[in-house]
Image (spheres, grey):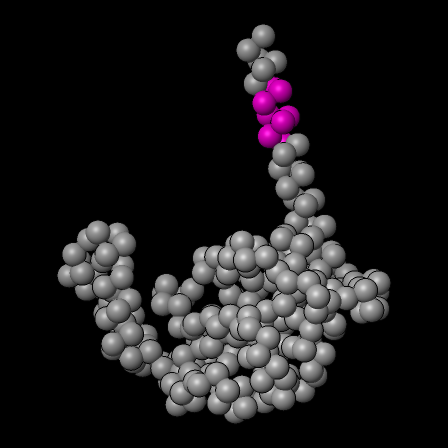
Amino acid sequence: MRRKENQSSTFASCDFSYICFMNYIESLQKRYSVKKFDPSKRVPAETLRNILEAGKLSASSLGLQPYKILVIESEEMLRKLIPAFHNPSQISTCSHLIVIVSKKAVDGSYVDGYFRHISEVREIPVENLNLFRKNIESYTENNIEVHLWAEKQAYIVLGNLMFAAALEKVDTCPMEGFKAEILEEILGMDPEKEKVAVTLAIGYRSEEDHFQHMKKVRKPDEKLFKFL
């Protein structure tokens, strides 16, 4: 009798795993880069919070998170940002715009704050982290392309945000087609210390966006994957 119960439990676990797998594959199949959102539909606050939490939990090299995430939600600010984009269709109809800003340098004060935070969260003396700190300082002080490294970290966040949004049945469009100097001026950024890495419009697709009916085109497995 016990063996049958164990078997049932195993099968139930397998069924659950299969359902979860199909749910996220189906969500990614339905995802596409929306060209026009429905301006009458807003992403609920709780749903937005879940998506942002996924971005917060993104992997980050050395754990430094050399970026910040701006969430543009006011209609007034969204309108102001329209001239900064080469294609205004998404920005003028989306519910929210997420702007991922990457650092151009990681200085000592930023590293200090990082280690104070580790010490507080993990409840360990900051002195115990000296070896880890030396490794980080060695990298950030000797890497002349920290800005490129930071930008790569921002794109990891972008992937997590898009994946989470797809699971939440929220549509997205990642956008690099913007005039950085206009965007940075409107957002009050310091171009000497930071830059807009990428933006992500989110909302719900418009029925008028005919791209949603097109088949997804991706490389076939034999051209994309190579097993060694």
Above or below, 26 relative to 12: below
Q: Looking at the image, can residue 84 be seen?
A: yes
Question: Where is residue 110, by image quadrant?
Answer: bottom left
Give coordinates of residue 173: x percent, y percent: 66, 70
Give the quadrant of the N terminus: top right
Above or below, 141 relative to 14: below
Region in magenta: 7-14
- Residue placed most toward the observer, 127 or 214: 214
Question: Does residue 32 appear to the left or right of 183 in the view shown?
Answer: right
Question: Does residue 219 appear to the left or right of 71 in the view shown?
Answer: right
Q: How many marks?
A: 0
Question: Does residue 175 appear to the left or right of 36 in the view shown?
Answer: left
The residue lying at 18 percent from left, 60 percent from top is 126
Above or below, 146 relative to 9: below
Question: Where is residue 76, by image quadrant?
Answer: bottom right
The residue lying at 52 percent from left, 79 percent from top is 197
> Magenta segment, principal secondary structure?
helix
Q: Looking at the image, can residue 227 be seen?
A: no
Give the quadrant of the C terminus: bottom right
Give coordinates of residue 172: x percent, y percent: 65, 66
- Residue placed most toward the observer, 220 or 157: 157
Give coordinates of residue 219: x percent, y percent: 75, 65
- Residue placed most toward the observer, 108 or 86: 86
Magenta span has 116?
A: no
The residue lying at 25 percent from left, 76 percent from top is 109
Above or below, 27 relative to 97: above
Question: Where is residue 9, by image quadrant?
Answer: top right
The residue lying at 55 percent from left, 67 percent from top is 158
